[in-house]
Amino acid sequence: MTIEATGAPAAAPAEGSKLETRGVLILVVAIFFLFGGITNLNDVLIPKLKGLFSLNYAQAMLVQFAFFTSYAIFSIPAGIVMKKLGYFRGIVLGFGIMAVSCLLFLPAAYSGLFGSFLAALFMLGGGITLLQVAVNPLILSLGSPETAHSRLTFAQFFNSVGVFLMVRFGAEIILGETAETDGSTLTGEALKAYRVAETTVIGHSYIGLAIVLALIAVMFWFARNFIERQKVEEVKMTGSFALLRSNARLRFGVVCIFLYVGAEVAIASIMVNYLGDDRTLALDPRSAGIMLSYYWLGALIGRLMGGFLLRLTRPGLLLALFAAAAIVLNIVSAVSTGELSAYSLVAVGLANSIMFPTIFSLATEGLDEEAPQASGLLCTAIVGGAIIPLLTGVVADAGGLAVALVVPMGCYAVIAWYGLYAARK
């Protein structure tokens, strides 16, 4: 919705509306910052919980499975809820679910049970899904249609900033202190007490996030009059699967979103353990976690470069080149040792940078009235972040972390194929 003056008497209210719009835009950008950060804290949680609960890699990847499964389950219901409640009530509900989910990490820590953390993560993912369904169209409505894409790109940039900063400092807090006691030597109540003591820092960290979420929810309360004026588009599922069957380009794009999110999350999920292996750098968890943040920093830098590069060449061709670069970097990391192995895997973050938006735009290119249905199908494919990491964990348990890189390599190979397919079409 565009809010502007239509005559002299309306000039003052329009200026006030513009100020109000900017205020809401700042709050929405803050949500994007939190989205990225909270989602990718899972990368830091995995090595922490893996060590404490003596999990194999497949079991540790249940962290991502619990979180990303919520995207597939809650995306469509969230759209329906948003239509019934409106943006304001929907956003407040999303904040409420996220805040309660963060609070659940404290009893999960005191329970000493891995399953309690999975339940909290699943609920947290549901809250984030509801908020994403709300704020993506909301940010598009905060101004003229001509500048909608620049506003969304601006918000996505802060999403990447949130990922980098929260992973960076999350590694300091959650992985920063290592216990002097070897948990593998404990049993019974002593083992439970050890786990409770070591996971308390996780609970306290998420309590801090709950407070931040509550504060932003209060800020949205003061902006409620403006937000309630924004019209929520009706969620239309009719024709979605018919569109998927009839549109090969969209169908291929849905598969690639599934594979891309899965590959990106899988690499980030094993990164701390990979860098801590004697074959690479033998880093302590804190140092490896800090280095993991540079993987996400590469994605941030690449997105800044990508906007320029996409003006110089065809998007499909650029997508194929970046996917090929990701394959080469994975191969180099898998067959080498030491710093070369470590840094080449971290550099995959740079290769990942343009993939999601480019796949998304290629898959929806040429769609007008059917674009909302296509967008919903593509967003549902984010569930790849649940499946691909789990498969990577299974391969890692069978053959080691270097061998497990074959899973994301396969994902990138399909994405490169899609890029060439789109370039030809």
Image (cartoon, rainbow, N blue to C red):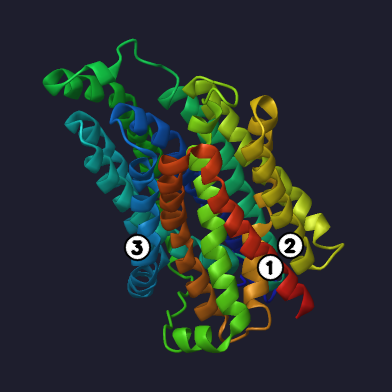
Q: Which residue is drawn at 46% across and 55% down?
A: 388
The answer for how far apart the CA atoms under marks 3 and 2 are is: 42 Å
Instruction: Tell whether 79 sits left or right of 303.
Output: left
> Residue 71, position in %: x, y?
40, 61
Q: Is disc 2 surrounded by few (<14), some (14 to 19) or many (20+) residues within 10 Å? A: many
- Compare marks 1 and 3 and give the one earlier in the sequence: 3
Label 3: which secondary element: helix
Q: Can residue 151 be seen in this view?
A: yes
Q: Is disc 1 surrounded by few (<14), some (14 to 19) or many (20+) residues within 10 Å? A: some
Q: What's under tag 3, amino acid-wise?
A: Arg
Q: Is disc 3 surrounded by few (<14), some (14 to 19) or many (20+) residues within 10 Å? A: some
Label 2: which secondary element: helix
Q: Which residue is drawn at 48% across and 31% down?
A: 273
Residue to which mark 3 is pinned:
89
Q: Which residue is drawn at 47% across and 60% down?
A: 384
Is there CB contact under 8 Å for labels 2 and 1?
A: yes
Residue to which mark 2 is pinned:
320
> Residue 410, position in %: x, y?
59, 57
- Which is in the foreground here, disc 3 or disc 2? 2
Q: What's under tag 1, amino acid-wise?
A: Trp
Q: Which residue is drawn at 68% across and 37% down?
A: 344
The extreme front residue here reads: 399
Residue to which mark 1 is pinned:
417
The extreme left residue here reads: 189
- Compare marks 3 and 2 and give the one earlier in the sequence: 3
> Residue 17, position in %: x, y?
58, 62
**Which residue is more in the foreground, 328 or 24?**
328
Label 1: which secondary element: helix
> Residue 12, position in %: x, y?
63, 63
Tell me where residue 255 sits by quadrant.
bottom right
